[in-house]
Image (cartoon, helix red, strand yellow):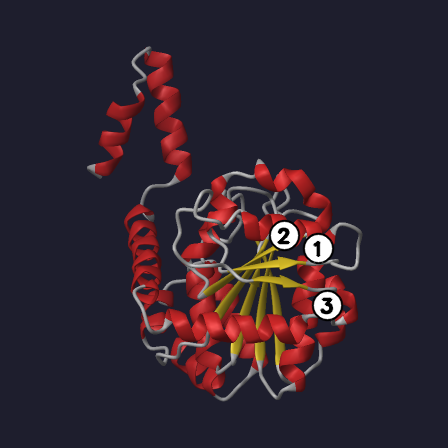
Amino acid sequence: MWQQLLLQLQAGDRRALARCISLVENEQEGYMTFLQDLPARQAPVIGITGPPGAGKSSLADALIGTMTSAGKKVGVICVDPSSPFNLGAVLGDRIRMNRWFNHPDVYIRSLASRGSLGGLNQMIIEITAVLQAVGFDYILIETVGIGQSEVEIAGLADTTLVVLVPEAGDEIQTMKAGVMEIADIFVVNKSDRPDADRFVANLKQMQAPAFNRSKREIPVIKTVAHLQKGIKDLIEAIETDINASTQNDRKIVLLTRRLLQIIQRLRMKDIKPALVQQRIEEKLAEGEFQLFRLATEFTHI
């Protein structure tokens, strides 16, 4: 089955692509061998994150439009909030990007975050590798926008866009370091609104040596996504960042993070949450629950 799917995948079969993603996401038997047989392609991964209401989906839509107009193929992963009851995706981003459903150069897939604290699906690295094997020129990943815990995207994306709006105003001063420090590019969307220029100036001021330990200056790009304003400037900044990341240690650090995440999950695969919960209940009933002793018990499985 897997070998046939691989052949169909390399032939550009979209149905095979959809099935492969589903099988990999659900860790169907043989998925790891399938992943090992994928061709080693490195299409750049662009992460889009930021607070709710910043216009991440509109920005992704605008990027897709400009990229496809230039003859590029784009794969898109929208990580949607999960239902707390069945961990299924709400699929809201598909509704906002419906004009790309049947476009031959665009593939959009919604995934549930399934309770992941980092705002991403736990199989996102593997699913991204499947998309890269198909031959897309860009992979866009939009996170759920749950707030400060989305630093996980920095371990996956070659370039991370942190999307903000002028209304954030003074809130930018109180944002936790996590989301602010993962930015490769700041995107001030809806920049036709009042105080946009002042907000951009504040972002740039935050990068002054007195406030920022990083030696590199992070570009700040103004956009109005629904009007396609600033999108070409943004793509130029993305290309510049991608080219820079392939020429320094950032690429090695990025790949190290990805590999460590895969190793960690593979080592955890035999530890079932139901079993952990059962052991906690037993220890609590015995009056002998101790967090670190129980953790050691599971690490010796």
Query: Label 3: which residue?
Result: 97
Query: Label 1: which residue?
Result: 197
Three-letter residue code for mark 2: Ala
Left or right: 274 as drawn, with respect to 141: left
**Residue at 39% across, 28% down:** 278
Marks 3 and 2, the one that precedes in the sequence? 3
User: Which percent across, then down, holds residue 138?
Assistant: 53, 76
Q: From what the image shows, is residue 187 above or below residue 281?
A: below
Three-letter residue code for mark 3: Met
Marks 3 and 1, the one that precedes in the sequence? 3
Query: Label 2: which residue?
Result: 201
Q: From what the image shows, is residue 163 above or below residue 104?
A: above
Mark 1 near mark 2, Cβ–Cβ under 8 Å? yes
**Residue at 79% across, 69% down:** 227
In front here: 38 or 194? Answer: 194
In front here: 252 or 278? Answer: 252
Is residue 88 among what the camera can see? no
In front here: 145 or 75? Answer: 145
Number of residue marks:
3
Image-quadrant location for residue 126: bottom left
Image-quadrant location for residue 96: bottom right
